[in-house]
Image (tube, helix red, strand yellow):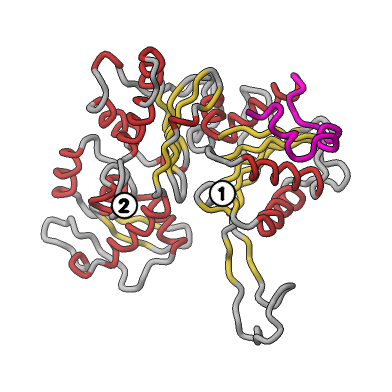
Amino acid sequence: MADAVTVLDIGSRWIKAGWAYNQPTDGEPRILAPSAVYVDPSGPGADPGVSTSSAPGELQHPIRRGRIVSWDQFESLAYYVLYELMGWELGNEGNIMICEPVLTGRSDRETMAQLMFEVFNVTGIFCQDQAVLSLYAVGRTNGLVVDLGHDKIDVATVAEGMLIPSSVRRLDFGGANLTQYLQRLLQDPQRAQPQPDGAGGLHPTQPLSDDDAEALKALCARCAETRAGFTSAVESAAAETFRLPDGQEFTVAAEGLRVGEALFQPYELLGVRGPNIAEAACDSAACLHDALLRKVMFENMLVVGGGSVIPGVTQRFLSEARSLVPAAANAALTPIPEYMPSPNVTRDAAWVGGSVLAKVALLQNHFIVKAEYDEAGPGAVHRRCA
């Protein structure tokens, strides 16, 4: 494993891990693990004065809005993913590529390097922004990336493989907000009974659990082509029944449309102030001073992340963006190469791009190795990881 490279994509809901591979193959993230750690109240560090005989443990989320908020919990999570699931061997860990969220601070990157070298004993480490890697996944080094994440949405422009920090826009809502919105829709007393036109749907009498709501959202969420189309579609929506993996059935109608629409009307539907994803994307590109570079960004937009698999979201995003940019800009989406093996390349774009870059970086000796770390300390990670 000395020359092997593990690609670790850090997300608030999922951690994706797998071996870097040569394109094109049928490789995908080998491991998809929830970004959660079970904390036992009777474990080390528990308060000895508090009885825990009946106190249940709870799931903690060490990664929130693109930041690792608990390094101890993240260490436990990474150990489980890398050694238990990936099959790392003690003393033969190899190299690791970290796909890190945009706006990751220098101190966090140094802490990651310190953790990997001193605790996980890796041979080498390389870090890169998820926005840059998402473009690598589709064979591009220039473009505007909209990453629809679990608890945030990141928008950024990339030029010649380098993130432009001043263009980064972060929206404080994401897939989790859509899930909560679906739960509220299903529990709205005014919509508890089917409407005469069938638009009301049939709703559970008990609150829908987070896991069930996530599963139902994945089945029913969709986007209308335009805002006017959304209004007419809601009025004529027919009830549909969806079966969850555990066998439960739910009948919904316009709720799926409303969930997708929340990405484009966050204030009206979610109560979240700020721009929608198309407005944020246009603002990100508009901040660039070079007119030619702005045009390049508008003509190479890429929607990735878990929310990118919602049916109709990319078409709606393009429609909204075209209404906001000059006609001469010819706003367009970056096409997914036909040779890409994964049908979910946009969902896994950062990991796929990381596996592509990892091979190149290893061959060109861009990885920070242990000798450099021992010489310069955690700050060595900034030498080649821009």
Exactly how many numbered labels are in the figure? 2
CA distance separating discs 2 and 1: 21 Å
The answer to whether residue 45 is visible is yes
Identified by mark 2, the residue type is Val
**Residue 32 location (% of width, % of height):** 60, 47
Q: Is residue 210 magenta?
A: no
Q: Is residue 367 magenta?
A: yes
Q: Which residue occupies 45% across, 34% down?
A: 168
Mark 2 or mark 1: whose residue is earlier in sequence: 1
Q: Which residue occupies 43% across, 61% down?
A: 212
**Residue 100 location (% of width, % of height):** 59, 39
Between 263 and 336, the residue placed more toward the observer is 263
Identified by mark 1, the residue type is Arg
Between 273 and 318, the residue placed more toward the observer is 273
**Residue 292 location (% of width, % of height):** 38, 12
Label 2 sits on a secondary structure element that is: loop
Q: Which residue occupies 34% across, 31% down?
A: 283
Label 1 sits on a secondary structure element that is: strand
The residue that label 1 is drawn on is 67
Badge 2 local density, few (<14 within 10 Å), some, or many (20+)?
some
Q: Give the quadrant of residue 166.
A: top left
Magenta residue span:
364-386
Mark 2 touches mark 1? (CB < 8 Å): no
* Lateral position of residue 314 relative to residue 109, left or right: left
Q: Give the quadrant of residue 280.
A: top left
Mark number for residue 231? none
The residue that label 2 is drawn on is 272
Q: Which residue occupies 69% across, 58% down?
A: 72
* Lateral position of residue 169 relative to residue 354, left or right: left
Between 372 and 73, the residue placed more toward the observer is 372
**Residue 287 location (% of width, % of height):** 37, 26
